[in-house]
Amino acid sequence: MMPAFRPLERVLTYNWGSLQKGSVVVFKNKEKIFIKRVVKIDKGKIYVSGDNKKLSSKVEPFTLDKLIGRVFLKY
């Protein structure tokens, strides 16, 4: 699958409402910022994955305090 977001594209996020499986989120992990799709939310941890499994960087589950926002617009 082709990635939905490419380097240097800009996104607009918001921080209200609930996350659900399939949401695209922006979060900070080890001083880097990532855009990934939510695959699971379990016991306060958010599990994410990239759309392109072969090229996407792997990241560990993160907690809500690392969330920057949910993507609602790409430009």
Image (cartoon, rainbow, N blue to C red):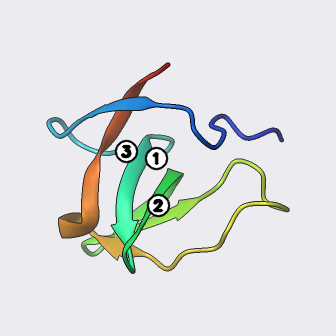
Neighbours of disc 1 within 10 Å: few (<14), some (14-19), many (20+): few
Residue 3 in which image quadrant: top right
The mark found on residue 36 in the picture is none
Measure how far apart labels 2 and 3 are at the Cα level. Answer: 8 Å
User: In terms of secondary structure, where does tag 3 sit?
Assistant: loop
Q: Residue at x 27, y 75 (%)?
A: 43
Amino acid carrying label 3: it is: Gln
Disc 1 vs disc 2: Cβ atoms closer than 8 Å?
yes
Relative placement, left or right, of 75 versus 7 is left
Q: Residue at x 38, y 34 (%)?
A: 71
Question: How far from the left and from the top, in percent, is residue 49?
Answer: 60, 60
Measure how far apart labels 1 and 3 are at the Cα level. Answer: 4 Å
Amino acid carrying label 2: it is: Lys
Relative placement, left or right, of 61 versus 1 is left
Question: How far from the left and from the top, in percent, is residue 20?
Answer: 37, 44
Q: Looking at this rendering, what residue extends furthest in the left direction?
A: 16
Which callout, 1 or 2, points at the residue further toward the start of the chain?
Answer: 1
Residue under pointer 1: 21
Neighbours of disc 3 within 10 Å: few (<14), some (14-19), many (20+): few
Question: How far from the left and from the top, in percent, is residue 37?
Answer: 53, 49
Residue under pointer 3: 20
Residue under pointer 2: 40
Q: Residue at x 64, y 73 (%)?
A: 58
Measure how far apart labels 1 and 2 are at the Cα level. Answer: 6 Å
Disc 1 vs disc 3: Cβ atoms closer than 8 Å?
yes
Amino acid carrying label 1: it is: Lys
Where does the N terminus fall, quadrant-wise? top right
Question: How far from the left and from the top, in percent, is residue 7?
Answer: 63, 43
Disc 2 vs disc 3: Cβ atoms closer than 8 Å?
no
User: In terms of secondary structure, where does tag 1 sit?
Assistant: loop
Neighbours of disc 2 within 10 Å: few (<14), some (14-19), many (20+): some
